[in-house]
Image: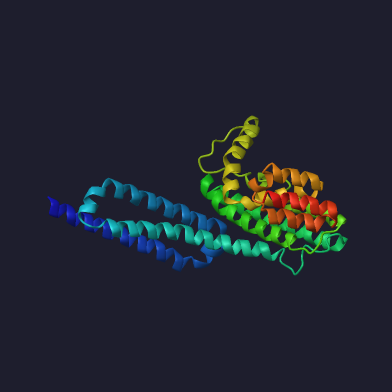
Amino acid sequence: GSCENAMLTRKFVEMVSDIAMLWIHLPAALYKQELQSVAHRVMIYFNDTTYILGSITRLACQWQEVIQKCGMMPRMAQEIDNLSKAAFSHSYAQVRERTMQLQSLVSANKFFRNTHKPNQEAKVRAALAEVRTQVEKVANIWKSLLAPQCFARFLGAILDNVCTYIYAEIMSLKDISVRETEVLPTLILELMGEGLAPFLSRGSPGQPKGGPSAADEEEDASKQVFEPLFSKFAPNWTKLRELVDLFSMRLQQIVDRWEDGHWRAKGFTSDEVIHFISLVFEDGDYRTEKINRILQQA
């Protein structure tokens, strides 16, 4: 009868609440250090939490009418929300920790200045190569555990934050010499010269595996899946890559690409493009004319 259904429903929701409380708090208490620092541990927890969340959500949908009649839907929704927050909170905490570690490799005072000097160039090149290596290590672990959307979300957050930092550091320079316009792009390419490929070498869960003859097809399929995802979750990866092209362009080319909408589409503002021009090109009537053209379409 309805009374029995109401009692069962309350017991079910209470059971869900108990499971959620244990799952949220017990691993955090027992494995706090591992969840903060061990790459595979945090994503296994994310996957397990997501699985539990999905199972509870499906049951809630099946019992929706009864749960609503018993007035238990708000509590059910709250427990589902708590589990969802737990799944992401530990993952993003590790994203933040790893981002800070990577930024520390390139965060010395005025790190990107004087790269025209061989010693400083070598120092920056080695640091960016180490950043790439560290990201590859994390990517190889996470990609083997996570669905493509989640992998791109978490690794993309790391790449986006690191690229934002590097971009800001370069754009904060007071001026860029002719030699630095040659060196800085090659330094950026230490990190991103091979594109996303080094971060996509491992298979994802559910990804079909073929023999050696299928390697090219798998690589193409991987690009089709991941490039749009990383464009969404790591827009500043693309922006930093575009900065490489900016260094090799003539002033007129830069203005033309502004007028055809290219720089806007890649996330650049008129102020950023003008600032770059001011850093790289010598002051004079010609530069002023081109800057004014950009300002007219800002």
Q: Which quarter of the picture shows residue 223?
A: top right
Q: Give the x, y percent position of residue 134.
A: 67, 56
**Closer to us: 203 or 170:** 170
Is residue 80 visible in the rendered structure shown here?
A: yes
Residue displayed at 74% across by 43% down? 256
Residue displayed at 55% across by 54% down? 154
**Closer to us: 261 or 212:** 261
Q: Give the x, y percent position of residue 96.
A: 58, 63
- Residue 152 is left or right of residue 242, and the answer is left
**Closer to us: 128 or 288:** 288
In the displayed structure, would residue 128 be above or below residue 242? Answer: below
In the displayed structure, would residue 47 be above or below residue 98? Answer: above
- Residue 195 is left or right of residue 28, and the answer is right
Is residue 182 visible in the rendered structure shown here?
A: no
Q: Give the x, y percent position of residue 167.
A: 70, 57
Residue displayed at 85% across by 56% down? 284
- Residue 202 is left or right of residue 295, and the answer is left
- Counting every numbered tag in the picture gives 0
Q: Which quarter of the picture shows residue 161?
A: bottom right
**Colour scheme:** rainbow
Q: Give the x, y percent position of residue 52.
A: 38, 53
